[in-house]
Amino acid sequence: MARGKRRWWAAGIAVAGLSGAGWGVARLVAFGPPPALAGLPAVHWPARNQFTRERVELGRLLFFDGRLSSNGKVSCATCHDPARGFADGRKVAEGILKRRGERNTPTIINAAYNREQFWDGRAASLEEQALASISNPQEMTTETTPEQAYAACVSRLTAVPEYRRRFAKAFSSSEITILDVAAAIASFERTVLSGNSPYDRYLAGDRSAMTPSQIRGLETFRFVGCDGCHRGIHFTDGAYIMSGIGMRRKPRDPGRFVVSKFPQDFGAFRTTTLRDVALTAPYMHDGSIATLQEVVEHYDKGVKGTDTELDDRLMAPKQLSKQQRADLVAFMKALSGTGWQTAQRPVLP
Ligand code: HEC
Ligand code: HEC
């Protein structure tokens, strides 16, 4: 649907115009958020950070701007690169001064639909997540406390007249605040969406949208119970699962345990969405599996281990044929959609 950025601003006008609202109302809502893409529900815009065009445009600049980091070199897009499906293609992330993180970079495409952010769900919103990146010494800052990281970030942005002008317009306040930085970035992220995939078109009745192999793959996906966890329209139930990935690593990544403090969540990570998954190799929270073929082989073999918290749906070997494995991979490739491709690197102020 949203093929060009102008198109969805225009669509906002069209919808407002058709809704029967009086002209005054129609003009107020003339620039609505992008319409839902085929196959996906509308994005929720929180009451405190409603859609405005100014915020989205400002957030787009900030997302690509190295000024968010202490040395001016690391932007959100360093790791969430549009050319790599808004991920980075690395096993684990590499941040400021080449500092290595422990986890694989997830895409931000459709992150607007995540119930919580991060592999362990420790951020409740996209706004909170953005603050966490700006103050993360493995990602963007060399300061020692979050407060210092925020203050330094705000002063780097305040030094740019174009940002002062844009923030004043987007937030009607005279000073740039770190909360407004996060709100603008989150607004931009809420427009980086993907839908209308071959799978969505197939579900909508276009039987030729998926290849025969992809259709068989969908059947296998259901038959072997992948959809027990990768469920529903987003291909995730949002649950945190101890799936055996990273089980032998020392020290273990505690995963969801850090947030919930439940012993059974030790080593559990969120079931990932599978939308656009073909774009974001390598896979899993530790980037330990290089390709979709190998992910399927991993599940096919069954996860071995004595860990009592291991999800038992994953333990039995599935005994898939070569064809079935290939079909599953083909099916996951049918989950690559469109929309996000319009979110391009801007010219920075
Ligand atoms: C050094 C690389 C790096 C930089 C820079 C970076 N990120 Fe990330 N991002 C990651 C990694 C790695 C994770 C997963 C971390 C975890 O789960 O603990 C992540 C997670 C996320 C998520 C959660 C996605 C999900 O599915 O849970 C969002 C949203 C996000 N980043 C947005 C941003 C924004 C906005 C910025 C800039 C303010 C940013 N990132 C900067 C590497 C990076
Ligand atoms: C019991 C729940 C469960 C079942 C069943 C399940 N998965 Fe997963 N899947 C997960 C979890 C949890 C992760 C993330 C694990 C991690 O990184 O620690 C994951 C990760 C993945 C990934 C990597 C995505 C990424 O972006 O890194 C792919 C691909 C995948 N699963 C495909 C499948 C397929 C295909 C099947 C069926 C053969 C399947 N899954 C069955 C829970 C499940």
Image (cartoon, helix red, strand yellow):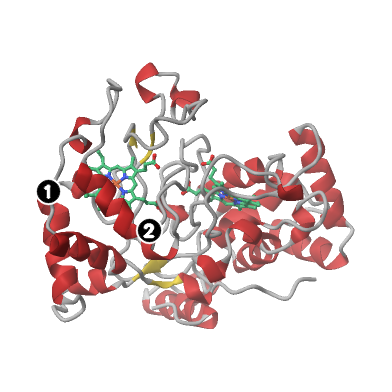
Of the image marks 2 and 1, the number of the one nearer the N terminus: 2
Q: Residue at x 20, y 49 (%)?
A: 227
Q: Are marks 2 and 1 in contact (CB under 8 Å)?
A: no
Disc 2 crowd rating (10 Å Cα; few below 14, some 14-19, many 20+) is some
Could you say where residue 104 lies in the image, as x and y percent from the top left?
51, 48
Residue 218 in sight? no
Q: Is residue 86 left or right of residue 202?
A: right
Amino acid identity at mark 1: Gln
Amino acid identity at mark 2: Thr
Disc 1 crowd rating (10 Å Cα; few below 14, some 14-19, many 20+) is some
Could you say where residue 269 lies in the image, as x and y percent from the top left?
40, 36
Q: Residue at x 61, y 42 (%)?
A: 101
Find residue 166 and report its image quarter: bottom right
Q: Is residue 201 above or below residue 166?
A: below
Q: Is mark 1 within 8 Å of ligand 2?
A: no
How far apart in space, not on screen, are marks 2 and 1 (Cα)?
Answer: 19 Å
Could you say where residue 222 lies in the image, as x and y percent from the top left?
13, 53
Q: Quadrant of the C terminus?
A: bottom right
Find residue 61 and report its image quarter: bottom right
Q: Residue at x 68, y 49 (%)?
A: 95
Residue 267 in sight? yes
Of residues 216 and 54, the one drawn nearer to the viewer in this rendering: 216
Dot 1 corresponds to which residue? 319
Could you say where residue 163 lies in the image, as x and y percent from the top left?
80, 63
Q: Is residue 213 left or right of residue 56?
A: left
Of residues 224 and 201, the one drawn nearer to the viewer in this rendering: 224
Q: What secondary structure is found at the residue carrying circle 1? A: loop
Dot 2 corresponds to which residue? 291
Q: Quadrant of the N terminus?
A: bottom left
Which disc is residue 233 wearing? Answer: none
Q: Residue at x 40, y 76 (%)?
A: 15
